[in-house]
Image (spheres, rainbow, N blue to C red):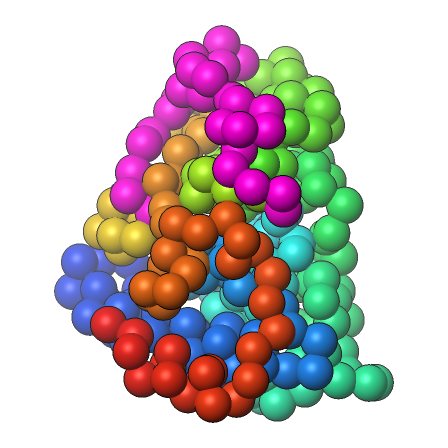
């Protein structure tokens, strides 16, 4: 288990890269578990999760929520490499009686809400931000969702509430990997002018490379005048060349031999 520490500066990037590689190995191991896992979206979002927990995971008043809960393998891996989970999640993932279920299990440390019904995480985060403001704390909420998830109306209803309540301690990160369960987002329900949509809801919009830790760490700062939407451009299946950019990599159960090969090929 890693020691839980705060990593906020550029000097921390080599350590974050090391953690990211370890986390990708864990995700691949979970894809080789009895049930498999949502490997494509887990590999795309893992850098965002590691950055969020490294930056804000130590703050008792702050909240990090993975709204795209099907990427639970990434969440468990990020919690482990950031020192929040004590046991290797890949050892129990997908096995009978294990707490490491296919969607985030709130009985585990570091997971305040069970997410899985898409769109709910953003509402949890908005409620948390409002509660912290009413309590007079400096706590913020960081919600990490997906671009396919934005087809859920609850996301936009919550964005309206965030604007109406002027929740400047709210950061919504969109894992823009371009894929969803049935294919490419652009082929199923294109989300055009995403920056303009969030700006219309009163958000400060930041577009970043979701695999570059210097950009991730900088983006996870509140604006203090407006809520923040981070459009993090990522690659589905990032790190495994056979999966990168392939919407068919949404979910997989792989043999252990292939898992060993993929882990050995990680950059």
Q: Residue at x 35, y 40 (%)?
A: 233
Q: From this viewpoint, is residue 170 visible?
A: no
Q: Is residue 151 above or below residue 145?
A: above
Q: Quadrant of residue 11?
A: bottom left
The residue range painted magenta reads 181-210
Q: Residue at x 58, y 36 (%)?
A: 148
The image position of residue 257, as x and y in percent, is 47, 90
Observer-nearest of 244 and 105: 244
Q: Is residue 170 above or below residue 239?
A: above
Q: Residue at x 39, y 50 (%)?
A: 245
| Image mark count | 0
Q: Is residue 243 left or right of residue 120?
A: left
Q: Is 101 a magenta residue?
A: no
The image position of residue 198, as x and y in percent, is 48, 19
Q: From this viewpoint, is residue 240 visible?
A: yes
Observer-nearest of 263 and 65: 263
The image position of residue 59, as x and y in percent, is 50, 58
Kindly give the residue lying farthest to the left in the view shown: 11
Q: Is residue 40 left or right of residue 14?
A: right
| Quadrant where the image shows the C terminus | bottom left
Q: Residue at x 22, y 58 (%)?
A: 9
Q: Is 201 a magenta residue?
A: yes
Kindly give the residue lying farthest to the right in the view shown: 97
Observer-nearest of 104 and 33: 33
The image position of residue 89, as x and y in percent, is 60, 82
Kindly give the residue lying farthest to the top in the view shown: 200
Q: Is residue 126 above or below residue 239?
A: above
């Amino acid at each position: 288990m890693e020691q839980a520490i705060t990593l906020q500066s550029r000097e921390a990037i080599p350590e974050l890269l090391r953690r990211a590689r370890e986390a990708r190995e864990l995700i691949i191991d979970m894809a080789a578990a009895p049930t498999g896992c949502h490997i494509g979206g887990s590999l795309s979002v893992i850098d965002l999760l590691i950055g969020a927990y490294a930056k804000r995971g130590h703050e008792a008043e702050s909240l990090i929520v993975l709204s795209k809960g099907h990427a639970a393998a990434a969440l468990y891996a990020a919690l482990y490499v950031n020192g929040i989970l004590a046991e290797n999640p890949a050892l129990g993932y997908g096995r009978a009686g294990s707490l490491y279920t296919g969607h985030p299990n709130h009985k585990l440390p570091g997971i305040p809400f069970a997410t899985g019904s898409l769109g709910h995480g953003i509402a949890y985060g908005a409620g948390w931000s409002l509660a912290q403001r009413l309590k007079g704390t400096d706590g913020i909420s960081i919600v990490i969702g997906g671009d396919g998830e934005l087809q859920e109306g609850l996301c936009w209803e919550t964005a309206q509430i965030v604007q109406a309540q002027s929740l400047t301690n709210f950061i919504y990160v969109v894992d823009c990997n371009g894929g969803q369960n049935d294919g490419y987002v652009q082929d199923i329900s294109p989300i055009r002018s995403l920056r303009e949509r969030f700006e219309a809801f009163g958000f400060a919009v930041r577009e970043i490379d979701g695999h570059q830790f210097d950009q991730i760490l900088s983006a996870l700062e509140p604006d203090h005048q407006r809520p923040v939407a981070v459009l993090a451009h990522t690659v589905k299946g990032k790190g495994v060349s056979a999966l990168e950019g392939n919407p068919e990599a949404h979910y997989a159960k792989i043999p252990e031999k292939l898992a060993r090969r993929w882990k050995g090929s990680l950059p």
